[in-house]
Image: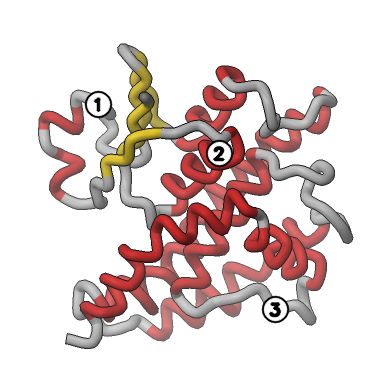
């Protein structure tokens, strides 16, 4: 059985879990959280970058959520995570990269400042940073995604692809920080997120991380 390393609440780990769910493939989860444990020799032997997620499949070990999703797609071709057309496949990879490079850092700010920081680490929220992120930095990123989001279905048709998974995973992280896409400004993207949250593979992933979310919220009440 394959082993997935990383905290389920991490957006990049969430991406891999959604991929496993779509494929209907079981895996063993090592719920290691970001922090000192990622720099220990035993984890660096798995991923020398000290990042999550990492996947072990027999003697194969790889990191990076996009690579993991592509590996799953190639090993288990049923319920494909990539479109068929070469142009669409290239754009799918690009949107997945864009979500990780442009969307993830901004969603993480909201997540850290409004959720994990005050609840788990007892840190005060940097409201100026949150306001700058939400009001200045996020809008152009969401504008870009809005322009590429269809009125119905998902980004490349009726099924979730690596691109869809990547965008949804980041916006779920922002949602934990009390941010949601404004449906009046980005109507297609907001509707896309709603459809994505209803997908069984996404709902299953959210259920799996629910215990960790509740633990963080409970820490903020102590």
**Image vertical order of residue 27 relative to residue 121, above or below:** above
Point out the frontmost of discs 3 and 2.
2
> Spatial distance from mark 1 to mark 2, Cα to Cα?
21 Å
> Spatial distance from mark 3 to mark 2, Cα to Cα?
27 Å
Determine which residue is flagged by label 2: 19
Which of marks 2 and 3 precedes in the sequence?
Answer: 2
Compared across the picture, whether 44 is left or right of 161 comes to left
Q: Which residue sits at x=84%, y=25%?
A: 85
Residue 148 in percent (x, y) is at: 81, 52
Residue found farthest to the left: 41
Give yes or no for contact between labels 3 and 2 (Cβ–Cβ under 8 Å): no
**Mark linked to residue 46:** 1
Q: Quadrant of the N terminus?
A: top left
**Image vertical order of residue 40 relative to residue 200, above or below:** above
Number of marks drawn: 3
Residue 150 in percent (x, y) is at: 86, 55
Residue 210: quarter of image: bottom left
Which of marks 1 and 3 precedes in the sequence?
Answer: 1
**Mark linked to residue 182:** 3
Q: Secondary structure at mark 1?
A: loop
**Image vertical order of residue 154 relative to residue 51, above or below:** below
Q: Quadrant of the C terminus?
A: bottom left
Q: Secondary structure at mark 2?
A: helix
Residue 43 in percent (x, y) is at: 19, 33
Quick check: can you spot residue 141?
Answer: no
Residue 69: quarter of image: top right
Q: Secondary structure at mark 3?
A: loop
């Amino acid at each position: 059985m394959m082993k997935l390393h990383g905290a389920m609440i991490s957006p990049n780990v969430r991406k891999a879990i959604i991929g496993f769910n779509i494929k209907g493939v079981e895996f063993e989860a090592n719920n290691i959280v970001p922090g000192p444990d990622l720099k220990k020799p035993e984890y660096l032997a798995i991923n020398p970058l000290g990042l999550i997620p990492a996947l072990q499949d027999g003697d194969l070990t790889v990191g990076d959520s996009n690579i993991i999703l592509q590996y799953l797609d190639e090993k288990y071709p049923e319920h494909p995570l990539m479109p068929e057309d070469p142009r669409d496949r290239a754009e799918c990879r690009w949107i997945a990269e864009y979500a990780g490079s442009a969307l993830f850092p901004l969603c993480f700010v909201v997540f850290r400042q409004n959720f994990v920081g005050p609840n788990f680490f007892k840190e005060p929220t940097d409201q100026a940073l949150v306001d700058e992120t939400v009001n200045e930095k996020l809008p152009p990123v969401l504008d870009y995604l809005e322009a590429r989001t269809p009125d119905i279905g998902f980004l490349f048709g009726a099924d979730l692809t690596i691109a869809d998974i990547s965008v949804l995973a980041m916006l779920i992280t922002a949602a934990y920080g009390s941010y949601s896409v404004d449906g009046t400004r980005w109507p297609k993207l907001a509707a896309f997120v709603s459809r994505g949250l209803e997908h069984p593979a996404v709902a299953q992933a959210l259920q799996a991380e629910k215990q960790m979310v509740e633990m963080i919220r409970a820490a903020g009440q102590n």
